[in-house]
Image: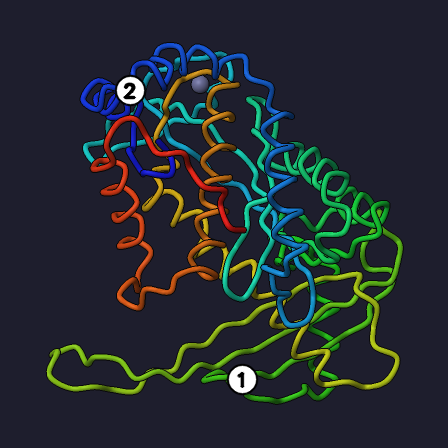
Amino acid sequence: MHFSNLESLNSLSQSISLKNLKADIPSISTIARTADTMDLEEIRSVGIEIYGKARKKKMFEPCYGMWVGVVDAHEQITSPYCRCPYCRNRTITKKDGVKETQYYHEFTAFILAGPKISYILDIEPVLPGQGELKSAYRLIDRVCRNYPKAFKIVIGDGLYLKETVFNLLEKHHKYAIAVLKEERRQLFEEANRLSLLSEPQIYKRGKTYYRVWDHSICGCWDGYGKKVRVIVSEEETHKRVHSKDGKSFEKRVDRANWMWVTNLPCPETYNLGDLKNTVGVSHSRWQIENQCPGETVNIWNADHVYRHSKNAIMVFLLLLFICVNIFNIFRIRNIKDRSIRTKIYLIDLIKAGFYTTRNPLPTIPPIPI
Ligand SMILES: [Zn+2]
């Protein structure tokens, strides 16, 4: 169902009866009921095995020479009705001023960042009454144990600038990078003060001009107590865009300011290459945020609730991400047909293949990963 992008148990049900597959596939009510009690650890172990094979065959590439994991929260909006005890809720105000309670499920995801594909390693639900950090803490701890050598650095947004997160990662011999926001006043102000006193490194990468400072700061983060690096990056990207009248082009300059805190060790000697890579790696979270969850929702229907229970939601998502991971590896490694250029087209081909294959289904050859 996930691989063929059938979008729902209902459409699977139709295929089962149309294609006369009743003897081969359990009924959708059995599938849904089973999902309530399936062991998540068993599904995760399938994911670990696939990762192991793919890594061994060198199907992943590091980000700027570093193996990087990204942790972030995503939500699945479900409905205006609460359906299970694990629904989170919030009040939203609609356009006409009417207030409505919205029920949703949220989870944190751990993604292995790469230049070509983002590989989803694991997810963990955010439970009602708990924040994203608690879920992320459980997730990071489990991923570090299940994938001890997969990554060296973990990146998160401003929320992850917490001593608990930095210390947890240190315990697993990993480094952390977190976005520095104004709320962390002491560190923020110290970094700004140091930036005024020193000259930045200036370089160009692609179409973007960078002015980057790399400060070593001690004693401005109560609770952590160790020295950290604060990297400040002022970026200017020159773009050629359509003008407002739509008849010609005009030049536009996009400016962005970034600040990150990390416990990555400073290189012993001055090294611009290292700094460029650290800035590149720090940006990978932002690239993934734009690419990965959006894609799984838009293309793969990750926001569809196949069965509403705490366990079933996780089961369908974990299985979906296994499919998406295999699909992504397959796409970048095995497509010899030059006419297949987009993901959507390949997904459509798989779907068409599923619809047109005669019953009995042929024995599926092992997936060449
Ligand atoms: Zn629920």
Front residue of this view, candidates 47 and 284: 47
Measuring from the top left, give residue 88's x and y in whole percent: 48, 23
Which label belongs to residue 21?
2
- Residue 152: x and y in percent read 75, 57
Q: Residue at x 51, y 60 (%)?
A: 286
Question: For this rendering, which residue is in front, 307 or 17?
Answer: 17
Instruction: Please tell me which residue is depicted at 79% across the width and 64% down the height of the picture.
Output: 264
Above or below for 358 versus 180: above
- Left or right: where 163 falls relative to 322: right
Which type of secondary structure does the marked residue at label 1 adopt?
Answer: strand
Q: CA distance from mark 1 to mark 2?
A: 54 Å
- Give percent across and percent down for residue 222: 83, 50
Q: Quadrant of the image for the N terminus? A: top left
Horizontal side, residue 114 vs residue 293: left or right: right
**Left or right: 290 as drawn, with respect to 64:** left
- Residue 90 in the image: above or below residue 156: above
What colour scheme governs how the chains and residues are painted in the rendered image of this protein? rainbow
Q: Earlier in the sequence, mark 1 or mark 2?
A: 2
Quickly name the residue at label 1.
205
Q: Amino acid at mark 2?
A: Leu
Q: Residue 229: give x, y in percent of width and height.
A: 78, 67
Give the numbered dot on residue 2. none
| Quarter of the displayed picture in which ligand 1 can be seen | top left
State which mark lies toward you, 1 or 2: 2
**Amino acid identity at mark 1:** Arg
Considering the numbered disc 2 on the image, is that residue within a helix, a strand or a loop? Answer: loop
| Mark 2 neighbour class, 10 Å CA radius: few under 14, some 14 to 19, many 20 or more | some
Q: Say above or below: 80 vs 297.
A: above
**Residue placed at 63% from the left, 52% from the top?**
156
Q: Nearer the viewer, residue 217 or 314?
A: 314
